[in-house]
Image (spheres, rainbow, N blue to C red):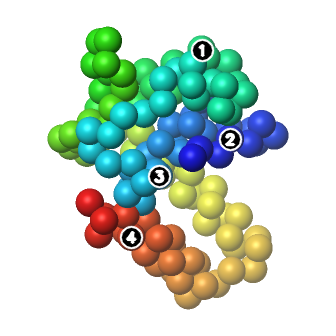
């Protein structure tokens, strides 16, 4: 279900956080759905269980998942997006880097906007399935 790239410079725990968020957006994971246990996912992805635990802790901190003692980890039923200033600043920096890369790849504004619209459409597909 989740793809982790060991060669990617992004830390593995952050890759997993992003993968879970994307799966929820696409409707592959639904509110109240149980996530694999730390051990199960560590075996599936062949990564350290501590890394999975760190990812789950970050997702729980953001209110995206919840851990129910003795029952497991679940997608939060009533997640409310919040505008975290620190994360917004990081997002802006990431967007700036992407725009610079797009320029040096020769993409013009129309091509870039089409690409963004295509990605938004892919992610919104899950919203229709909720």
Secondary element at image label 4: helix
Q: Residue at x 26, y 60 (%)?
A: 130
Q: Which residue is mark 1?
A: 50
Residue labelled with disc 2:
4
Closest to the observer, 55 or 37: 37
Q: Which picture quadrant has residue 96?
A: bottom right
> Alpha carbon of mark 4 to alpha carbon of mark 2: how far?
23 Å
Lower sequence index among marks 3 and 1: 3
Mark 2 residue crowding within 10 angstroms, few (<14) / some (14–19) / many (20+): some
Distance between mark 1 and mark 2 Cα atoms = 15 Å
Comparing 86 with 128, the one in front is 128
Question: Left of 46 or right of it: where is 54?
Answer: left
Seen at 71% across and 64% down, the residue is 101
Marks 1 & 4, CB-CB < 8 Å contact = no
Above or below 87: residue 120: below
Q: Secondary structure at mark 1?
A: helix
The residue that mark 4 highlights is 125
Compared across the picture, whether 21 is left or right of 78 comes to: right
Residue 15 in percent (x, y) is at 60, 39
Q: Position of residue 38 (x, y in %)?
A: 52, 21
Most foreground residue, 117 or 78? 78
User: Label 3, label 1: how many angstroms apart (C-alpha)?
Assistant: 22 Å
């Amino acid at each position: 279900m989740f793809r982790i790239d060991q060669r990617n410079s992004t830390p593995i725990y952050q890759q997993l956080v992003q993968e879970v968020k994307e799966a929820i957006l696409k409707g592959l994971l639904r509110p109240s759905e149980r996530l694999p246990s730390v051990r199960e996912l560590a075996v599936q992805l062949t990564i350290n269980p501590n890394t999975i635990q760190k990812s789950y802790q970050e997702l729980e901190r953001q209110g995206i998942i919840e851990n129910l003692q003795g029952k497991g980890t679940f997608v939060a039923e009533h997640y409310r997006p919040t505008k975290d200033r620190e994360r917004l600043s990081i997002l802006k920096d990431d967007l700036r880097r992407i725009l610079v890369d797009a320029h040096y790849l020769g993409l013009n504004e129309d091509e870039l906007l089409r690409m963004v619209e295509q990605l938004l459409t892919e992610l919104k597909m899950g919203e229709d399935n909720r």
